[in-house]
Amino acid sequence: MREVKDSMGRLLFLTNMEQQQIAM
C-alpha cells in the first residue's frame, strides 16, 4: 500500500506543478 500511496503522491505533485506553470 505504501508504494501505491507514494505513486499517488507523485501524481498529485506533478498535477500541482502543471497547475502552477499554467498559472504563470
Image (tube, grey):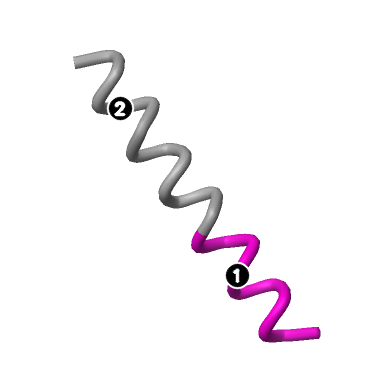
Residue holding disc 1: 18
Q: How many marks?
A: 2
Residue 10 lies within the magenta run? no
Residue at image location 30% in from the left, 27% down from the top: 5
Q: Residue furthest left?
A: 1
Amino acid type shown at disc 1? Glu
> Relative to residue 19, is residue 14 depicted above or below?
above
Residue at image location 28% in from the left, 14% down from the top: 2
Compared across the picture, whether 14 is left or right of 23 comes to: left
Q: Residues within 10 Å of mark 2 (few under 14, many from 20)?
A: few
Local secondary structure at mark 1: helix
Give the CA distance from mark 2 to mark 1.
20 Å
> Where is residue 10 drawn, in percent x and y?
47, 40
Compared across the picture, whether 16 is left or right of 23 comes to: left
Image quadrant of residue 19?
A: bottom right
Residue at image location 81% in from the left, 84% down from the top: 24
Which range is magenta?
A: 15-24
Amino acid type shown at disc 2? Lys
Q: Are marks 2 and 1 in contact (CB under 8 Å)?
A: no
Compared across the picture, whether 11 is left or right of 19 comes to: left
Q: Residue furthest top?
A: 2
Residue holding disc 2: 5
| Label 2 vs 1, first from the N-terminus | 2
> Relative to residue 18, is residue 12 depicted above or below?
above
Residue 18 lies within the magenta run? yes
Image quadrant of residue 20?
A: bottom right
> Where is residue 12 drawn, in percent x and y?
45, 51
Residue at image location 33% in from the left, 39% down from the top: 8
